[in-house]
Image (cartoon, rainbow, N blue to C red):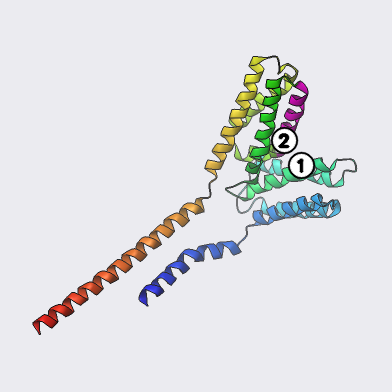
Amino acid sequence: MDKKWFLLFAIIIILTPFSVSAEQQSPMEKLDDISDEALQMVKFHRYDDAKKLLDYFSAQFQNVSGKEKPLTLDEVRIVNTTHDEAVEATVSPDMKYEERINKLTQFRLVIDALSTSHQHLWLEMEDPILNAIHKAKEAVAKGDISKFHSSFNQFLSLYNVIYPSMKIDVPAENIQRLDARINFIDEYRTQMVNSPENKQELDKLDTDLKNLFADMEDDQADPSIWWVIISTGSIIIATLSYVGWRKYQGEKDMKKDRSRDLKD
């Protein structure tokens, strides 16, 4: 019976921190929810509702930005810029639906990058971005300049969506190196098929992007996972030690009883 109570007590200890933290939500996380709701409204063509949510976000952001985690001037500027573009996407009479989605997604990813410390949403864009680069490389290898233009334009569109979020998370020198490669390829894109040097720049861009995503995923691994592993391991060790100690005590008591019986 003692062992069962000990195991129950151990389980309660390890689960309690998660149940408490799950109920708490920081002001930035609430803003993150608002940005997500605005994006969902635009997906369903409910532009007026999205505009109202963005206006509400703006009012709340003024109260939050200087509190729990002070934002840098660059971060505030990025939030304001992407917010203004998101608002424009909800009120513009001529903007295409896909562009509206891109603007709201861009804003959503920025707020996510500021409100969470790991597993940022913009990292989920890795596959479509790398696929666009790979298609561009295949087009160059086949000498299909039209297909290259199409694939590289697709890459630029996707890259622009995550670019503000990257500026929050990625060191400035890495951003500058990527910008230099992308600008070079874009400027000399008409010569891409016939220039081995230009092809190498495309290969280097592919490598730089792969390294960037890999490094960010390593850096932003959830630290709570290690806490769970360590805590669970400690509980298991403690439980086994307790069970072993009880078994040892039981055997020791049995030997004492046998000794008494033999003496008697």
Verify CB contact (< 8 Å) between mark 1 and mark 2.
Answer: yes
Q: Is residue 150 visible?
A: yes
Task: Name the residue furthest left.
Answer: 263
Q: Which residues are magenta?
A: 145-161
Report crowding for label 1: few under 14, some 14 to 19, many 20 or more residues within 10 A (C-alpha).
Answer: some
Residue 255 screen position, x and y as percent = 17, 75
Look at the image and tell me in which quarter the N terminus lies: bottom left
- Nearer to me, 19 or 8: 8
Say if residue 80 shows up in the picture. Answer: no
Q: Residues within 10 Å of mark 2 (few under 14, many from 20)?
A: some
Which residue lies at the image location 74% right of the left edge and 25% below the top edge?
148
The numbered mark at residue 102 is 1
Give the residue drawn at x 90%, y 43%.
93
Q: Is residue 117 shown in magenta? A: no
Q: Secondary structure at mark 1?
A: helix
Instruction: Quadrant for the C terminus, please.
Output: bottom left
The image shows residue 202, relative to residue 159, as above or below, that is above
Q: What's the distance in space between the residues labelled 1 and 2, CA to CA? A: 9 Å
Residue under the image location 71 percent in, 32 percent down: 155
Please tell me the numbered disc located at residue 160. Answer: 2
The numbered mark, 1 or 2, whose residue comes first in the sequence reads 1
Q: Is residue 46 toward the left or the right of residue 220 in the image?
A: right
Q: Nearer the viewer, residue 62 or 253?
A: 253
As helix, strand or loop, the secondary structure at mark 2 comes to: helix
Q: Residue at x 62, y 57 (%)?
A: 26
Nearest the camera: 255 or 10?
255
**Where residue 194 appears, x then y in whole percent?**
70, 14
Residue 188 point in image, percent of width and height: 72, 18
